[in-house]
Amino acid sequence: MKQTVGAVLWDLDGTIADTSDLHFEAWQETLAARQLAYSRADFERDFGRSNPELLADLLPTLDREEHVLIADDKESAYRRAMIGRVTVLPGVLEWMAAFRNAGIPQIVCSSGPMGNIAGTIAELGIADAFLALVSGVHVPRGKPAPDLFLRGAAVAGVPPEQCLVIEDSLHGVVAAARAGMRCVVVGALAQQHRELTSHFTHPDHLLDVMDLSQRPWQSVVNLWKRGDLVNPLHSIDSTAEFKTEQGTRIRTRLIQPEDADLLIKLFHHLSPDTKRRRFNIGLQNVDEKRIQETAQVLAGVDNHTTGGAILGFVTNPDEELITVARLARPENQPDSSTAEVAVVVRDDYQGQGIGTEMLRRLITLARQMKIKTLTAGVQSDNTAIFRILNKLSLPIEMRTSHGETEIEIKIEG
């Protein structure tokens, strides 16, 4: 079925409202009171991030309670400064009116606290344009994670692939891509088209304009010319779940750069035998620095060109990473139709069908990346991988030599 925009998720600062100078002044005032210099370059780098994440980097020696007090001071300074000074950016009112006349629900999705969002919208006099206001303060992860926009989609009652995000920050654009949404990027960032499109499954899912007055709102329809059907890749990234053979719920999503620490924690939970069979190395040959470097490389894949990975979490009682499935094209061959694949499951969750489900999801990702053949080299006593392969209805070739089995899986079609 043909899809088009079902809901519009607006960022606020720098997208709807010209608040950049006001926020910068508020940060400078607040941090100067604590003898911390904060430059315009620092501000541009951090723009779009949540306050807790930003302050954890700026003031790592302070505890969370102190970070909360500092954030409150900054937001109070912003709300004082904005009165009579905040303005709407060019083209915004025209686009809002057009979406409203077309019956398309609009939601503000901002990383800021609700007091800022409501205060800015009220100061601009545009509250009636929106179905809801959504704050990033209460979602698990801030941008560039997709949580805020997925919350907005849920509030609108619209699938992520039918949502249009309008953003001006890199963190926000990446969050939109990870949520599986189309995106209009405005402001200075619009000049970085090539870099930005690398985050999306198709470059046609991003429209860049310096300001909204330069384009008619109907131009967003073109963002749905490619990939009209629901993209399984996006469902993996956002809300896909499955149940193990024992009934345990597993939530899956695409890997993100900030997941390196989770990978390290999972590695240390694996038994010596699993590490030997999975990584073909003895524990005495692995130091902590190598583990950290490997985790950072894996977490840094783009899930689009050179490689990708899917994480699986148990959801009860606390979310915990228990499985990873990854694929990698040959080095310096981003267009190769072949990729190496690997799946690891924590020992206490093995034998429950998790590896099979993760490999199926990885095959979906591989097909999205236009990969036709998956390969793997495993120890011949790794019986778990052979059980997983037997459950797949795909052509598989195996060659065993000197205790190692080379596997080739054809996934085309």
Image (spheres, rainbow, N blue to C red):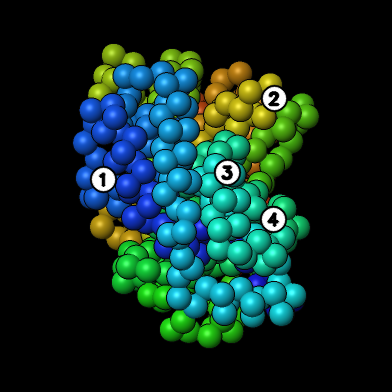
Mark 1 vs 2, N-terminal side: 1
Q: Amino acid at mark 2?
A: Asn
Residue indicated by mark 4: 132
* In this view, the mark in front (3 or 2): 3
Q: CA distance from mark 3 to mark 2?
A: 33 Å
Lower position in the chain sequence, tag 3 or tag 4: 3
Q: Position of residue 405 (x, y in %)?
A: 44, 38
Nearer-N-terminus badge (2/4): 4
Q: Position of residue 322 (x, y in %)?
A: 56, 28
Separation (CA) of disc 2 from disc 4: 30 Å
> Mark 3 — residue?
115
- On the picture, is 187 further left or further right than 322? left
Q: Which residue is mark 2?
A: 316
Per the model, the C-alpha gap separating discs 1 and 4 is 31 Å
> Given the image, on which type of amino acid does mark 1 rest?
Asp
The residue tagged 1 is 42
Q: From mark 1 to mark 2, how far is it between C-alphas?
A: 39 Å
- The count of marks equals 4
